Amino acid sequence: MARHILITGCSSRKRRKLEANLLSMYDDILISEVHKVSQAREALTNNIVHLLLYVLTEKDDDGLDFCREISRPDSDNHTPCIILVDEEGAGHAGLHHGLQHILPLTSSSSELGSLINKICNPMAMRLTPRYYIPETKAIIAQRDRELPTDVLNISSGGLLCEFTTNNIFQVCDPVMISINFTGAGETADLEGIYAVLSSLKIIERNPDFTPLRIRAGFTFIIVPPAVKNKLKTIFAKAGLTAAKSL
């Protein structure tokens, strides 16, 4: 699952430097950046953000108050924050604004990375459990093209699958997904799921190095009510089956 990180702060140079550093450390993050607190507030309202990195290069009590506000567990837009400050500003940020995660701008990549992994653990970020249900297949439809896929795991919010692309899969296009369950004591055909690509990995290549087999994650955008109800039933049975096998 990709970690969505928002960087904000007055210094565009330091934001860019931090972004480059993060991209060299991780291959599972999506980074966006804004300049003002008002822009950060709007981003938290309209987008998925798992972590806010606030680059403090000058006195900014309003920015620190904003970080304290969204860090509270009872906040409507609760988002963990890491404040990156110069040595002189660290004490002021923590003492006067009650912020927990404060690091000097001169911190090493390993120190910053350890704190990000602690706060923004990919396993802890999963909002819904994923299920491995044997013999689950799906059809991915794009315009007039259809690709049969093997479903590796599935949740109420998306699925992970593998398929042979034959160079016809378009990563930027949304898809319609139909899922066929024949395992876990349940047979069902679920149709009309509208989804977008969330992750992609090339598993196998053709002799000319073009992609042959792809592992792809899809996020469900629109799921018909009848399909939602059927998925709940299937997942409940899958959960009981998994518990009995332990």
Image (spheres, helix red, strand yellow):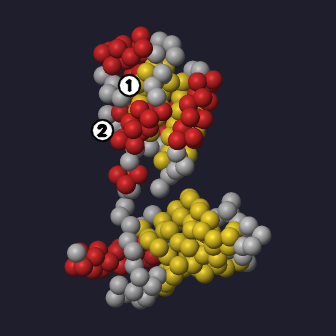
Residue at the disc numbered 1: 102
Query: In the displayed structure, would residue 221 be above or below residue 88?
Result: below
Mark 2 vs 1: CB contact within 8 A: no
Task: Note whether residue 77 is visible.
Answer: no
**Looking at the picture, which amino acid does disc 2 mark?**
Pro
Few, some or many residues within 10 Å of mark 2 (<14, 14–19, 20+): few
Residue placed most toward the observer, 234 or 123: 123
Few, some or many residues within 10 Å of mark 1 (<14, 14–19, 20+): some
The label on residue 62 is: none
Residue pictured at 52% horizontal, 16% vertical: 57
Residue pictured at 30% horizontal, 38% vertical: 73
Please tell me in which quadrant of the rendered image residue 140 appears: bottom right
The C terminus appears in which quarter of the rendering?
bottom left
Position of 175 with respect to 65 (left or right) is: right
Task: Note whether residue 25 is visible.
Answer: yes
Residue pictured at 30% horizontal, 22% vertical: 98
Q: Position of residue 199 (x, y in %)?
A: 56, 59
Residue placed most toward the observer, 222 or 6: 6
Q: Position of residue 209 (x, y in %)?
A: 74, 67
Residue at the disc numbered 2: 73
Query: In the displayed structure, would residue 176 be above or below residue 37?
Result: below
Q: Position of residue 77 (x, y in %)?
A: 40, 39
Query: In the displayed structure, would residue 141 be above or below residue 120?
Result: below
Q: Label 2 to label 1, Cα distance in Å? A: 18 Å
Query: In the displayed structure, would residue 43 be above or below residue 125?
Result: above
